[in-house]
Image: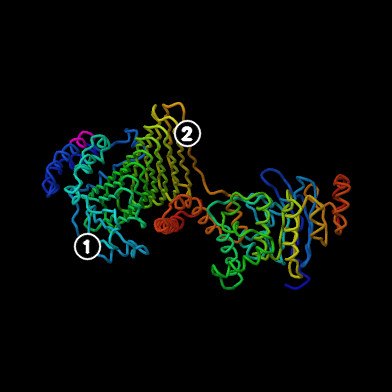
């Protein structure tokens, strides 16, 4: 048996042991949904690099870590820890999820504005079965092995709903923190975000850690935008570098809705961030912005698909990568324009900056077009800092290190600048600047 | 530094870019308080000289020496030269989206101030200082908050160079064809910027293709650079002569003419 097979068999067999614990007080319909998911995971196994979607990302280290899928315990994090983790944003309102479970005692902030509902998903199951059940019981999500794993072991996460025409002024901020109890375990947060007709919101998903051991966050987030709804979804993945982070964000958009994702990936020994957007109705607008910033031995993998299934859709994708140390990056983005999706306008770009000699990136933007009246463009670049720009800054008196730092920050700034909400933008800027400083120190001159 | 030490002393300078030898034994002395114009045909080495002085890594000095205020300039990194008071106005200023002009100039000014043992300026003090300089070079405040040269017109880029020069108040300013491609109004701005800096303790080297700028910035000396060497030197009247006669009369036997 290979390492992957051993880990796989262990995960599957542990499901039986955990099933009763997972069920808790959840409704009866959920048990067969979980079972279908574990059966699918049993069939699929851990992906090998022969699998095209996993060609450049090996999960052998996760398998070797011999993690236990039994839900992590709920302990060890104080409000003080949360304040430390959040830094200067700790005085803002946060809904806190510890190892994927809603922790109201760690949460803070004012009462929710009218039209906004935020609660633990486990708690929402009985309140909104009509909304949640079809999302949890979706066979098509199970083709991804770790989404299937999440489907089997998930037991909580965030449920956010913004009701019709509501437009909360402040962003809704969710913090997912891995506590020491996550050590050696897998947390499977399951999040559902529902933006009703005509509503407009901004949501932050921030992943942090106070766990210095090996752990794995395996998140699945489903986003639905009803007609004419609008959402800015900012994700900051800042797990500790002993952790593994896998996340899928599936987006379904109804007519005339506008979705913008701003995905910032900074942490994790190995991080895989998937976003799959389906433009299912006419006139939909979808923007996927991303920044991954890695150094040392980190590995980050960004997988995105934009599926234009209806006419008159617009999608704009811009992912930027900054890689230092001996890090590895993967960008695999695909845009599909189906036959019916006439008058589609799709753009997809990935630009990468290598700030050390040993960093590597594999980038593959793909475009598949079946309609004939569309405007599409795509491409990717890999480069180093512009020597001419570097000299320009130095010729004005900036030392080489500051000049490199300034140019690298400038390269990254386009992604933060696209975030309309000041509070969220400032947070991204702060965390990106801090990470850049560390990367630069560790990478030396390229 | 005593008054007898020149601002700049270049001796037997040879330099190359890639495989091409561009400077072939250039000698030049710029006294403190003087403005020197350097003219010459395309490809004669004017920009290479400017780049040697600023320390551009792609230009390799193969022989000769450059003393700046009596010190070996060539051993200094570009940033140290800048902090010591050398300023190069680029012929082709670089666009750097994502770094604002204001942020850049504040960082540059403070780097020099720290080097001189002065206190750093905070945001408010810097802005006040910058506004004064903006007035001098008729530089729009909106441009201050844009990315460095991002989407600037050719004239705006050159104006930005002069603005930066005004902020940094160099001891030795080197202008590399800053007047090229400018209309008469912009040219006047460049001239004002240079003239405002004229002082007994500052010098400037104005590299230009056209005599026009030298009507506004009257140089103390004019040199003609031909094939990597100073072929002829004279007073400001030489610029007018060159405008009328061109350079071809100088291209014979440059060695002789270069002898002091």
Seen from the viewer's position, the closer of residues A374 and A317 is: A374
Residue pushed farthest front?
A165
Mark positioned earlier in the residue sequence (1 or 2): 1
Image quadrant for the C terminus of chain B? bottom right
SS type, badge 2: strand
Task: Please say whether residue A438 is visible from this viewpoint.
Answer: no
Question: Which x, y percent locates residue A398?
Answer: 57, 60
Q: Is residue B198 above or below residue A68?
A: below
- The quarter holding residue A3 reads top left
For disc 2, the marked residue is: A376
Seen from the viewer's position, the closer of residues A141 and B169 is: A141
For label 2, the crowd category at 10 Å Cα-Cα, with few meaning under 14, some 14 to 19 and many 20 or more, is some
Seen from the viewer's position, the closer of residues B49 and A382 is: A382
Q: Is residue A288 magenta?
A: no
Q: Is residue A208 left or right of residue A149?
A: right
Give the Cα distance between marks 1 and 2: 48 Å
For label 1, the crowd category at 10 Å Cα-Cα, with few meaning under 14, some 14 to 19 and many 20 or more, is few
Please name the predominant secondary structure of the magenta segment in the image: helix
Q: Chain of mark 2?
A: A
For disc 1, the marked residue is: A105
- The quarter holding residue B122 reads bottom right
Q: Is residue A40 magenta?
A: yes
Question: Which x, y percent locates residue A93?
Answer: 31, 61
The residue drawn where x is 53% and y is 59% is A402
Q: Is residue B78 above or below residue B228?
A: below
Task: Please say whether residue B168 is visible from this viewpoint.
Answer: yes
Q: Is residue B74 left or right of residue A141?
A: right
Mark drawn on residue A77? none
Magenta part of the protein: which range? A39-44
Q: Chain of mark 1?
A: A
Label 1 and label 2 in one chain: yes
Seen from the viewer's position, the closer of residues B212 and A272 is: B212
């Amino acid at each position: 048996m290979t390492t992957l097979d051993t880990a796989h068999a262990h995960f599957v067999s542990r499901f039986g042991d955990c099933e009763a614990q997972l069920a808790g007080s959840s409704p009866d319909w959920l048990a067969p949904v979980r079972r279908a998911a574990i059966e699918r995971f049993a069939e699929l196994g851990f992906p090998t690099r022969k699998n095209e979607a996993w060609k450049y990302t090996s999960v052998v280290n996760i398998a070797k870590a011999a993690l236990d899928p039994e839900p992590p315990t709920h302990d060890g994090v104080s409000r003080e820890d949360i304040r430390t983790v959040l830094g200067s944003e700790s005085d803002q309102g946060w809904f806190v999820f510890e190892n994927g479970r809603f922790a109201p005692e760690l949460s803070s902030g004012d009462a929710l504005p009218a039209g906004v509902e935020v609660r633990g998903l486990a708690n929402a199951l009985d309140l909104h079965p009509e909304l949640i059940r079809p999302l949890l019981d979706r066979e098509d999500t199970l083709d991804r092995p770790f989404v299937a794993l999440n489907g089997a072991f998930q037991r909580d996460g965030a449920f956010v709903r913004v009701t019709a025409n509501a437009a909360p002024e402040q962003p809704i901020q969710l913090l997912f923190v891995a506590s020491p109890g996550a050590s050696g375990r897998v947390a499977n947060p399951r999040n559902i975000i529902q933006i009703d007709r005509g509503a407009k919101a901004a949501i932050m998903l921030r992943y942090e850690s106070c766990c210095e051991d090996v752990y794995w966050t395996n998140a699945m987030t489903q986003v639905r935008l009803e007609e004419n709804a609008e959402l800015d979804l900012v994700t900051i993945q800042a797990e500790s570098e002993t952790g593994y982070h896998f996340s899928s964000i599936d987006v379904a958009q109804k007519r005339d809705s506008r979705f913008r994702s701003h995905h910032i990936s900074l942490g994790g020994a190995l991080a895989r961030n998937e976003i799959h957007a389906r433009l299912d109705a006419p006139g939909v607008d979808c923007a996927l912005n991303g920044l991954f910033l890695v150094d040392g031995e980190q590995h980050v993998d960004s997988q995105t698909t934009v599926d234009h299934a209806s006419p008159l859709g617009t999608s704009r994708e811009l992912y930027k990568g900054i890689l230092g140390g001996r890090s590895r990056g993967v960008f695999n983005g695909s845009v599909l324009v189906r036959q019916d999706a006439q008058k589609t306008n799709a753009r997809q770009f990935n630009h990468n900056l290598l700030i050390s000699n040993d960093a590597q990136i594999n980038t593959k933007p793909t475009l598949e077009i079946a309609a004939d009246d569309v405007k599409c463009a795509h491409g990717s670049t890999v480069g180093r800092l512009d020597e001419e720009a570097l000299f320009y800054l130095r010729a004005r008196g900036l030392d080489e290190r500051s000049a490199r730092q300034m140019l690298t920050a400038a390269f990254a700034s386009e992604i933060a600048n696209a975030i309309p909400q000041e509070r969220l933008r400032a947070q991204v800027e702060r965390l990106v600047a801090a990470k850049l400083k560390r990367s630069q120190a560790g990478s030396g001159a390229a | 530094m005593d008054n007898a030490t020149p601002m700049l002393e270049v001796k037997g300078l040879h330099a190359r870019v890639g495989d091409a030898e561009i400077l072939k034994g250039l000698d030049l002395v710029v006294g403190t308080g003087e403005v020197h114009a350097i003219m010459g045909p395309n490809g004669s080495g004017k920009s290479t000289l400017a780049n040697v002085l600023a320390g551009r890594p792609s230009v390799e000095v193969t022989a000769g020496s450059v003393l700046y205020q009596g010190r070996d300039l060539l051993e200094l990194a570009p940033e140290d030269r800048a902090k010591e008071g050398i300023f190069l106005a680029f012929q082709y200023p670089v666009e750097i989206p994502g770094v604002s002009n204001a942020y850049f100039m504040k960082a540059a000014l403070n780097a020099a101030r720290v080097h001189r043992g002065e206190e750093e300026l905070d945001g408010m003090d810097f802005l006040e200082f910058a506004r004064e300089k903006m007035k001098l070079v008729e530089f729009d405040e909106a441009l201050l908050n844009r990315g460095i040269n991002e989407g600037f017109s050719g004239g705006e880029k050159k104006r930005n160079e002069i603005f930066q020069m005004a902020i940094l108040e160099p001891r030795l300013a080197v202008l590399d064809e800053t007047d090229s491609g400018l209309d008469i109004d912009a040219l006047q701005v460049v001239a004002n910027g240079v003239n405002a800096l004229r002082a007994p303790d500052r010098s400037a080297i104005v590299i230009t293709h056209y005599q026009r700028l030298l009507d506004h910035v009257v140089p103390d000396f004019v040199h003609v650079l031909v094939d990597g060497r100073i072929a002829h030197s004279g007073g400001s009247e030489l610029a007018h002569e060159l405008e009328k006669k061109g350079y071809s009369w100088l291209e014979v036997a440059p060695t002789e003419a270069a002898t002091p």
